[in-house]
Image: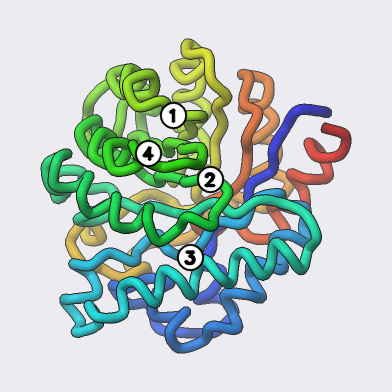
Amino acid sequence: MSGITILDGGMGQELLARTGAKPTGLWATQVMIDHPEAVSAVHDSFFAAGAEIATTNTYAIHRDRLEDVGLGDQFAALHTQALDMALAARDSHGAGLVAASLGPLGWSYRPDFAPPPEQAAELYAEIVALHAGADLLLIETMSGVDQAKGALMGCAEAKIPVWLGLSVDDDDGTKLRSGEPLAEALPLLDQYNAAAVLVNCSRPEAVTQALPTLATQPRPFGAYANGFTGIASTFKKAMASADLLSARQDLDPTTYAEHASEWVDLGATIIGGCCEIGPAHIAELSRRFGGAR
């Protein structure tokens, strides 16, 4: 198999599993504050497993989350720390790229919590400026059209490629989590010159439903699913912690790779994993789809 780029897997849940840390509303940010060495170790493990891209541990580093717990003054330093660790892991590995993660404002899976696009753009532009040393920008888990628009607007002045990750309804992959048709997000790709588009942090089955829609546009596309049973309604509130979510017991590396094989058959050329998808899963993806490129 050639022409497939292998992403890394989920940072946050892997950090919790390795450190035994208690989940908090800061997600992987709190673990990085308390156990920075664990973040570096996870990057190293994903590269060793065959990942070609390290995603910075910056998904949840937003001013509103930090200010709620008195850490607002650490915003820039935490972004810089996370970028430096990903770059160091890439350099130590001797190959690969670093993707700067831009997670959703407001809260994951709740596009109605996000600020209007113009306001969001200003907040994202501040993050983009802190990641000039990355190889690409990875907008993650955008669950509504306006939410995606705000993030893309914030990346408009970036000098590096921008990839857009969209999160779809777990029961109907043809729709964003907002209920809007996934197809309604596609015009944004041309409008803001996105280099690639992906479906992320959704059930693998929903990803398979979503990819034929992404295949209707010309740029590279792909997917990285999560390993949750679903997104509990109790989680969909600000500062909820990951202990409200349950991991599937039927998504071992072989089974996950079978889902990924369907994505490749549908034309996906970028594959990896999101929450609950660890190095063993990425190693199986690399074994099947990596190699000569």
Give the class, few, some or many, for how many residues have Cα within 10 Å of label 2's Cα (few <14, many ≥20).
many
Q: Which residue is mark 4?
A: 167
Q: Amino acid at mark 3?
A: Asn
Vertical side of 291 occupied by 44: above or below: below
User: Which of the marked residues, 2 or 3, is nearer the chain's N terminus?
Assistant: 3
Q: Which residue is mark 2?
A: 136
- Which of the two residues, 70 or 21, is positioned nearer the viewer here? 70
Q: Are marks 4 and 3 in contact (CB under 8 Å)?
A: no
Q: CA distance from mark 4 to mark 2?
A: 19 Å
Q: CA distance from mark 1 to mark 3?
A: 22 Å
User: Which of the marked residues, 1 or 2, is nearer the chain's N terminus?
Assistant: 2
Give the class, few, some or many, for how many residues have Cα within 10 Å of label 1's Cα (few <14, many ≥20).
some
Image-based side of 43 in relation to 193, left or right? right
- Would you say residue 26 is visible in this rendering? yes
User: Which of the marked residues, 1 or 3, is nearer the chain's N terminus?
Assistant: 3
* Residue farthest toward the bottom in the current orientation of the protein: 34
Q: Which residue is mark 1?
A: 194
